[in-house]
Amino acid sequence: MVAMIIQAVVFDIGGVLEINRDLGVTGMWESRLGLGPRELNERMADVWRGGSIGMISEDDVRQAVRECLGLDGGPLAEFMSDIWREYLGTANTELIGYVRQLRPRCRTGILSNSFVGAREREQATYGFEDLADVIIYSHECGMSKPDPGIYALTCERLQVEPAQTVFLDDSGPCVEGARQAGIHAVLFQDNSQAIGDIENLLAL
């Protein structure tokens, strides 16, 4: 087998480019609404799933919150603000800086299991569209990792072969899915390890 030169590096968002911590939003709202543990997500499960693959709009999400949780007006806006605050996390500034300097050595991409409305909010907060040549959001393409199709779509839009691609993710199943698709996948543990592993692959 002839080795192929790496031409693109693709990054996950949550837990990689964004540092996400449990801010206790779900528990806080369960307490506020008099719900039991896990009840909020059980009520909203179809909404969370539908929003992750673009089957519903943001208006649909807000309507579902009204129906499933009984929130409207100011409380609804407050709930959605809390959900997005936890979703967006904070910037992994070191890794974002590394991504920025990868071009023109190689093309850069972002591949994220996302939620309807994420592109606009992440662009406003982090400017990801200025960071990557291609951004694939699950809610826009109707597929989520580790579906083989989403890795194929990413390579197609980057105009590279899977064997010419490195993918960084903090999820074991998503990393394994990428490997099965023929991509060089790296499991994110920390910035130093991730950057070192990517650089080793770029040097091959």
Image (tube, helix red, strand yellow):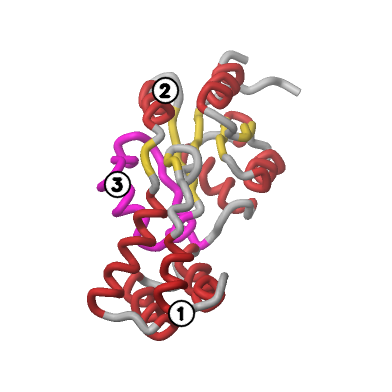
Q: Amino acid at mark 2?
A: Leu
Q: Residue at x 41, y 45 (%)?
A: 135
Q: CA distance from mark 3 to mark 1?
A: 35 Å
- Which quadrant holds the N terminus? top right
**Which residue matches tag 2?**
102
The magenta stretch spans residue 140: yes
Q: Secondary structure at mark 2?
A: helix
Residue at the farthest top position: 203
Q: Decide: is 198 above or below 171.
A: above
Q: Between tags 2 and 3, which lies in front? A: 3
- Which quadrant holds the C terminus? top right
Asked if residue 59 lies left or right of residue 187, the reply is left
Q: Position of residue 14 (x, y in %)?
A: 47, 46
On residue 123, the disc is 3
Q: Decide: is 134 above or below 85.
A: above
On residue 34, the disc is 1
Residue at the farthest right position: 1
On residue 51, the disc is none
Q: Residue at x 46, y 72 (%)?
A: 30
The region drawn magenta spans 114-142
| N-terminal label among 3 and 1 | 1
